[in-house]
Amino acid sequence: MPQAFVLINVESGAEEEVVTELRKVEGVEEAYYSYGVYDIITKVKADTMEKLKDLVTHKLRTLTRVRSTLTLIMMED
Protein backbone atom coordinates (compact mmCIF):
# COMPACT_ATOMS: atom_id res chain seq x y z
CA MET A 1 0.00 0.00 0.00
CA PRO A 2 1.68 3.27 -1.12
CA GLN A 3 2.51 5.75 1.63
CA ALA A 4 4.16 9.14 1.68
CA PHE A 5 5.13 12.01 3.90
CA VAL A 6 3.97 15.36 2.57
CA LEU A 7 5.81 18.44 3.83
CA ILE A 8 3.62 21.52 3.53
CA ASN A 9 4.15 25.27 3.64
CA VAL A 10 1.11 27.41 4.36
CA GLU A 11 0.30 31.09 4.60
CA SER A 12 1.52 32.70 7.80
CA GLY A 13 -0.81 31.93 10.71
CA ALA A 14 -2.79 29.26 8.83
CA GLU A 15 -1.14 26.21 10.41
CA GLU A 16 -3.97 25.30 12.79
CA GLU A 17 -6.67 25.79 10.14
CA VAL A 18 -4.83 23.65 7.57
CA VAL A 19 -4.01 20.83 10.02
CA THR A 20 -7.70 20.71 11.01
CA GLU A 21 -8.70 20.41 7.34
CA LEU A 22 -6.01 17.83 6.59
CA ARG A 23 -7.24 15.55 9.37
CA LYS A 24 -10.66 15.43 7.66
CA VAL A 25 -9.24 14.19 4.33
CA GLU A 26 -9.60 10.46 3.65
CA GLY A 27 -6.14 8.94 3.32
CA VAL A 28 -4.45 11.33 5.75
CA GLU A 29 -3.07 9.15 8.54
CA GLU A 30 -1.35 11.87 10.59
CA ALA A 31 -0.82 15.64 10.45
CA TYR A 32 1.47 17.70 12.70
CA TYR A 33 2.74 21.26 13.04
CA SER A 34 6.45 21.62 12.47
CA TYR A 35 9.08 24.24 13.21
CA GLY A 36 11.65 24.78 10.52
CA VAL A 37 11.59 24.94 6.75
CA TYR A 38 8.13 23.31 6.52
CA ASP A 39 5.05 24.25 8.54
CA ILE A 40 3.22 20.90 8.53
CA ILE A 41 4.22 17.25 8.15
CA THR A 42 1.53 14.84 6.99
CA LYS A 43 1.56 11.06 6.51
CA VAL A 44 -0.77 9.79 3.79
CA LYS A 45 -1.73 6.34 2.53
CA ALA A 46 -3.74 5.07 -0.45
CA ASP A 47 -4.62 1.75 -2.10
CA THR A 48 -2.64 2.44 -5.28
CA MET A 49 0.06 4.81 -6.45
CA GLU A 50 -2.46 6.48 -8.75
CA LYS A 51 -4.79 7.16 -5.80
CA LEU A 52 -1.86 8.46 -3.77
CA LYS A 53 -0.93 10.89 -6.56
CA ASP A 54 -4.57 12.00 -6.80
CA LEU A 55 -4.76 12.51 -3.02
CA VAL A 56 -1.69 14.74 -2.98
CA THR A 57 -2.43 16.61 -6.20
CA HIS A 58 -6.18 17.16 -5.93
CA LYS A 59 -6.93 17.07 -2.22
CA LEU A 60 -3.89 18.31 -0.30
CA ARG A 61 -2.30 20.80 -2.68
CA THR A 62 -5.64 22.47 -3.41
CA LEU A 63 -6.53 23.17 0.23
CA THR A 64 -7.04 26.85 0.92
CA ARG A 65 -3.92 28.59 2.27
CA VAL A 66 -1.49 25.82 1.19
CA ARG A 67 1.44 27.50 -0.57
CA SER A 68 3.66 24.54 -1.49
CA THR A 69 4.29 20.85 -0.85
CA LEU A 70 7.13 18.35 -1.03
CA THR A 71 6.13 14.69 -1.28
CA LEU A 72 8.41 11.91 -0.04
CA ILE A 73 7.12 8.52 -1.20
CA MET A 74 8.10 5.71 1.17
CA MET A 75 9.67 2.60 -0.29
CA GLU A 76 8.59 -0.86 0.81
CA ASP A 77 11.03 -3.65 1.69
Image (cartoon, rainbow, N blue to C red):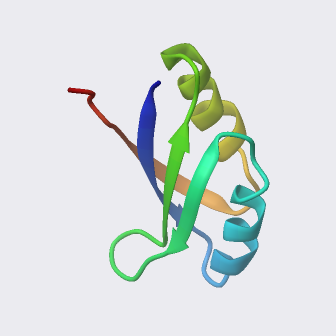
User: Residue 51: percent from the left, percent from the top?
Assistant: 61, 20
Which one is nearer the viewer's eye here, 32 or 7? 32
**Residue 29: x %, y % from top left:** 59, 51
Q: Is residue 49 above or below residue 28?
A: above
Residue pictured at 58% horizontal, 36% vertical = 56
Q: Nearer the viewer, residue 60 or 64?
A: 60
Residue 53 visible: yes
- Residue placed farthest to the front in the image? 77
Apparent side of residue 8 relative to residue 47 in the rendered image (left or right): left
The residue that appears at 69% across and 32% down in the rendered structure is: 58
In the depicted structure, whether residue 73 falls above or below residue 29: above
Q: Give the left or right position of residue 10, taking residue 7 as reference.
A: right
Q: Is residue 61 visible?
A: no
x and y, in percent, of residue 45 in the image = 54, 36
- As drawn, which residue projects farthest toward the left? 77
Along the viewing direction, whichever of 22 and 39 lies nearer the viewer: 22
Residue 19, compared with residue 35, is above or below; it is above
Instruction: Please count the marks in the image.
Output: 0
Q: Position of residue 76 (x, y in %)?
A: 27, 27
Residue 11 placement, left or right of 34? right
Work out whether 30 lies above or below 6: below
Q: In which quadrant of the rendered image does the C terminus lie?
A: top left
At 58% from the left and 21% from the top, the residue drawn is 47
Name the residue: 45% across, 27% down.
Answer: 2
